[in-house]
Image: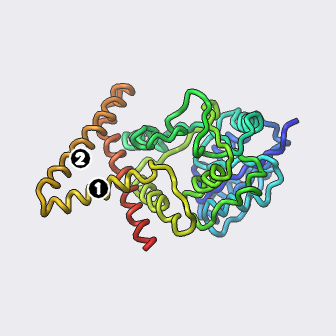
C-alpha cells in the first residue's frame, strides 16, 4: 500500500516556471489520492499565486502557503509543519520531473533504508542562446561543479553528501531538526550535513531524473554565483559547519591570484607565477570548451563556455571573500 507523500515547493515570482513544474508533478505515476502538494510562496509580485490558485480549483490536494520571510528554509519548514505525509519530497519550481520521479524516490527510500534519496539533474538553458547554452554546460561540467555527482551523472547508485530535491523520511526531522532559517542559501547542504553527522544515509540514484532551468544571462549568472559564494562562508556565523572542498575552491583560487599579483608588484617572480597560473587556467577552460564544441558540433561553445566558467569561478570566489568580510 502506497504511503502518503507530501511535496513542498518553495517559490517566489515564478510565473514562468511554476505551471510546468506542477504539470510534471501531477503527471507522475504516483496515486493522486496519496499526494498532497504545498506551494510555499514568498509573497510573489507576479502571477505565480494566480496560476497556483487555478490549479487548486482542479486539484484540491494542492495548497498555497504564504511565506512572509521569502526564503527557502522557512518555506520548507512551513510545508513540513502543515503536511501529513510520512514521506516528504522537497521540489524546486525551476525544475520539471520525470513521470516516475515520486514513485522511484519512495521505493528507494524504503528499500534502501535511507534517510534522504535523490537523483541527477539535467541542466537546460532558460533561453536557447549561445550564452544560455554555455552557462548550462558550465553548470553540468566537472570544472563548473567540482565533481558534484548529481550534476555530472552516475552509472549506479551511491552514497553521497547531498542530492537535489531530496526525498526524506518524516522521522529525520524529529532526529536532526528542521531547515535552518538563518540561512538564506545553502540550507539543503547544511541540513544534509546534519543527517550525515547523525549517522544517516543519503543515496543518489541515476534513474531518478529531473530537468533544471539554468540562468541564461551573464549578469544574472554572476549575481547567482556571487550570492552562492557568500553563503558558502557566511553560514559559519550561525552553525559550526564545513561543506565539501569544492565549495571553497573558488575562494582559494581568487585569493591565490590576488596574493600573487599583489606580491608581484614588489617581487617579480610572484608576477611570473601569477601569469603562469592565468595561462594554465585559460588553457584548461579553452580545452574543455573545445571538447564540448566538437562533441556538440557547435562552435559557439568556444566562446560561451570559457566565459561562463570564468564568471562562475570568479563571482563565486568574490562572493566568498565578501562572506568572510561579513563574518568579521
Q: Secondary structure beneath disc 2?
A: helix
Q: Report the disc number at residue 277.
A: 2
x, y (%) of residue 282?
Answer: 25, 42
x, y (%) of residue 43?
Answer: 64, 66
The N terminus appears in which quarter of the rendering? Answer: top right
The front one of 199 and 254 is: 199
The front one of 328 and 27 is: 328
Left or right of residue 230: residue 195: right
Q: Secondary structure beneath disc 1?
A: helix
x, y (%) of residue 235?
Answer: 53, 64
Judging by the rendered image, the residue that carries numbered circle 1 is: 256
Residue 201, quarter of picture: top right
Residue 317, quarter of picture: bottom left
- Residue under the image location 37 percent in, 43 percent down: 131
Looking at the image, is mark 2 or mark 1 earlier in the sequence? 1
Q: Is residue 217 above or below residue 306?
A: below
Amino acid at each position: 500500500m502506497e504511503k502518503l507523500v507530501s511535496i513542498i515547493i518553495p517559490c517566489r515570482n515564478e510565473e514562468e516556471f511554476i505551471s510546468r513544474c506542477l504539470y510534471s508533478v501531477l503527471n507522475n505515476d504516483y496515486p493522486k489520492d496519496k499526494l498532497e502538494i504545498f506551494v510555499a510562496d514568498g509573497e510573489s509580485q507576479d502571477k505565480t499565486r494566480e496560476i497556483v490558485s487555478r490549479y487548486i480549483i482542479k486539484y484540491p490536494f494542492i495548497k498555497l502557503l504564504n511565506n512572509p520571510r521569502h526564503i527557502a528554509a522557512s518555506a520548507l519548514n512551513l510545508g513540513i509543519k502543515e503536511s501529513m505525509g510520512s514521506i516528504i519530497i522537497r521540489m524546486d519550481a525551476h525544475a520539471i520531473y520525470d513521470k516516475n520521479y515520486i514513485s522511484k524516490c519512495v521505493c528507494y527510500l524504503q528499500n534502501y533504508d535511507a534517510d534522504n534519496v535523490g537523483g541527477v539533474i539535467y541542466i537546460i538553458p532558460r533561453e536557447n542562446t549561445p550564452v544560455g547554452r554555455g552557462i548550462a554546460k558550465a553548470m553540468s561540467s566537472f570544472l563548473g561543479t567540482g565533481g558534484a555527482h548529481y550534476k555530472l551523472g552516475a552509472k549506479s547508485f551511491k552514497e553521497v553528501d547531498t542530492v537535489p530535491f531530496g526525498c526524506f523520511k518524516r522521522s529525520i526531522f524529529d532526529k536532526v531538526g528542521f531547515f535552518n532559517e538563518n540561512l538564506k542559501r545553502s540550507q539543503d547542504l547544511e541540513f544534509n550535513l546534519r543527517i550525515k553527522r547523525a549517522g544517516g544515509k543519503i543515496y543518489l540514484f541515476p534513474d531518478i531524473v529531473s530537468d533544471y532551468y539554468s540562468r541564461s544571462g551573464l549578469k544574472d549568472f554572476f549575481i547567482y554565483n556571487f550570492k552562492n559564494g557568500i553563503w558558502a562562508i557566511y553560514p559559519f556565523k550561525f552553525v559550526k559547519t564545513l561543506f565539501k572542498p569544492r565549495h571553497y575552491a573558488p575562494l582559494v583560487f581568487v585569493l591565490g591570484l590576488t596574493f600573487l599579483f599583489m606580491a608581484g608588484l614588489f617581487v617579480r617572480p610572484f608576477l611570473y607565477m601569477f601569469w603562469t597560473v592565468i595561462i594554465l587556467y585559460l588553457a584548461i577552460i579553452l580545452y574543455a570548451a573545445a571538447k564540448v564544441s566538437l562533441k556538440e558540433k557547435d562552435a559557439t561553445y568556444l566562446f560561451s563556455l570559457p566565459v561562463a566558467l570564468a564568471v562562475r569561478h570568479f563571482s563565486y570566489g568574490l562572493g566568498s571573500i565578501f562572506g568572510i568580510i561579513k563574518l568579521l
